[in-house]
Image (spheres, grey):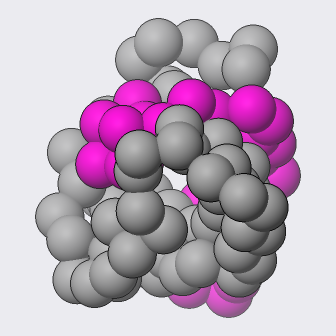
Amino acid sequence: MGARHDSPHAALANALATITNGKILRSRETSWASASFTGIRHRFVIDLDGDARADVVTGIGEREFDLPGHIVADILLVEREQQDRACRLTTDALTVEDR
């Protein structure tokens, strides 16, 4: 993953791995800013084992996340690939600095 353990990206990756009981296969973070806020866009590709269900992310947009110095402004499931018993999820999130 390449992110520091205390970074918002690493904290969000850990939270998503815990929520889904999955493994983060790939992730990336990109700095983001608007006229009023600064933050990070995050993408995570999560591999679920054969017994996990893809609906584990249902309601993910209403969850609270404990991230150092950031809050989750938006998070959603953007892709779900299902093959036999394997499932891969792709999520996008936007975090903003909590000042």
Quarter of image, res 9: top right
Residue 50 seen from this side? yes
In the rendered structure, the answer to whether residue 65 lies left or right of residue 33 reads: left
Vertical side of 2 occupied by 22: above or below? below
* Image spot of residue 35 (x, y percent): 68, 87
Is residue 94 inside the magenta stretch?
A: no
Is residue 37 inside the magenta stretch?
A: yes
Q: How many marks?
A: 0
Q: Relative to the observer, which residue lies in front, 36 or 57?
A: 57
Quadrant into which the N terminus falls: top right
> Magenta segment, which residues?
14-39
Residue at 54%, 80% (x, y): give it.
76
Residue at 76%, 39% (x, y): give it.
27
* Image spot of residue 91 (x, y percent): 63, 66
Q: Relative to the observer, which residue lies in front, 88 or 36?
A: 88
* Image spot of residue 78 (x, y percent): 71, 81
Vertical side of 78 occupied by 29: above or below? above
In the rendered structure, the answer to whether residue 7 lies left or right of residue 64 reads: right
Vertical side of 79 occupied by 86: above or below? above
Quadrant into which the C terminus falls: bottom left
Residue at 74%, 32% (x, y): give it.
25
* Image spot of residue 64 (x, y percent): 17, 64
Q: Relative to the observer, which residue lies in front, 90 or 5?
A: 90
Q: Relative to the observer, which residue lies in front, 14 or 47?
A: 47
Residue at 39%, 75% (x, y): give it.
55
